[in-house]
Image: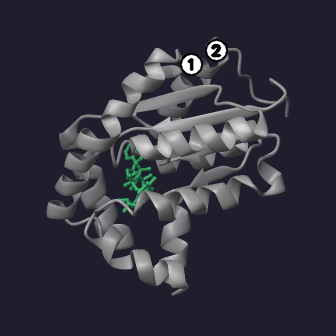
């Protein structure tokens, strides 16, 4: 493994970011930092932050950049991220990219790879509707899912170009079994010189 591994997972809602983030964090022995999970846990625990973002998330809107950036800056300030991390669901806007650049350059570090997980709209809508039955997430109704997808296309998909210009992006097909998607990501990372630590 390289001395430290700083990864970012990007892709539409339902592409499998959260699913793969958990598996990859264990594989590469780095913490997954999921803004969605952080917000959901705050909503569940009815913290001040949770009360602030609850309705925004239920409507499928993005939490304001200033709030999201502060959450990530705090999390990346924790010692377990010093040897690397995997960002899941952040950044999603140009301002978040800018702030992440600032945070990392202040640490004298940078991202190693941006993994783009692709999946078509029909597949992601069907996955999220299935998850609605299992988990009952407030933002997994069909109209909110479609809104989240539109927001992704408008605000987040353009960021891929920006990271492509930095030569950081590897695109991985997110269709098929979860294990197969993981194997594709592991192979794509290996091609970039990022290897899992020996067990
Ligand atoms: P997230 O938690 O990031 O939600 P998401 O985009 O839906 O992705 P998630 O990771 O949960 O789903 P996954 O694709 O893994 O964000 C939720 C909300 O938080 C946002 O709408 C926003 O309000 C807020 N937020 C978060 N980050 C923000 C930011 N940076 N700025 C502003 N606001 C922010 O999985 C989906 C389903 O597919 C699962 O049920 C899974 O089991 C299934 N699945 C996964 N892989 C599969 C496969 N290969 N085959 C079949 N099913 C699969």
Q: Between marks 1 and 2, how big is the CA–CA gap? A: 7 Å
- Please report contact status of discs 1 and 2: CB closer than 8 Å, yes or no: yes
In this rendering, the answer to whether 182 lies above or below 74 is above
Residue placed under numbered mark 2 in the picture: 192
Q: Quadrant of residue 16?
A: top left
Secondary-structure class at tag 2: loop
From the top left corner, tell me how far across and down residue 123 is, in percent: 24, 42
Q: Dot 2 surroundings within 10 Å: few (below 14), some, or many (20 or more)?
A: few
From the top left corner, tell me how far across and down residue 124 is, in percent: 27, 45
Q: Dot 1 surroundings within 10 Å: few (below 14), some, or many (20 or more)?
A: some
From the top left corner, tell me how far across and down residue 110 is, in percent: 68, 30
- Number of marks in the image? 2
The answer as to whether callout 1 falls within 8 Å of ligand 1 is no
Nearest to the eye among marks 1 and 2: give it.
Answer: 2
In this rendering, the answer to whether 45 lies above or below 76 is below
Q: Residue furthest left?
A: 143
Residue displayed at 64% across by 14% down: 192
Image quarter hosting the C terminus: top right
Q: Residue furthest bottom?
A: 46
Considering depth in this image, is 87 or 102 the residue closer to the camera?
102
Secondary-structure class at tag 1: helix
Residue placed under numbered mark 1 in the picture: 188
């Amino acid at each position: 493994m390289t001395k430290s591994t700083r990864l970012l997972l990007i892709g539409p809602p339902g592409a499998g970011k959260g699913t793969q983030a958990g598996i990859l964090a264990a594989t590469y022995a780095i913490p997954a930092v999921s803004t969605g999970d952080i917000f959901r846990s705050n909503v569940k625990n009815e913290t001040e932050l949770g009360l602030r973002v609850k309705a925004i998330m239920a409507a499928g809107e993005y939490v304001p950049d200033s709030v999201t950036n502060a959450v990530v800056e705090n999390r990346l300030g924790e010692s377990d991220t010093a040897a690397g991390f995997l960002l899941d669901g952040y950044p999603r806007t140009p301002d978040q990219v800018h702030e992440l650049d600032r945070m990392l350059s202040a640490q004298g570090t940078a991202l190693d790879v941006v993994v783009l997980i692709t999946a078509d709209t029909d597949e992601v809508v069907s996955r999220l509707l299935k998850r609605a039955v299992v988990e009952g997430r407030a933002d997994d109704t069909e109209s909110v899912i479609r809104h989240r997808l539109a927001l992704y296309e408008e605000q987040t998909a353009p960021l891929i170009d920006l990271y492509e210009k930095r030569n950081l992006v590897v695109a991985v097909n997110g269709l098929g079994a979860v294990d197969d998607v993981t194997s594709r990501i592991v192979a794509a990372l290996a091609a970039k010189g990022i290897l899992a630590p020996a067990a």
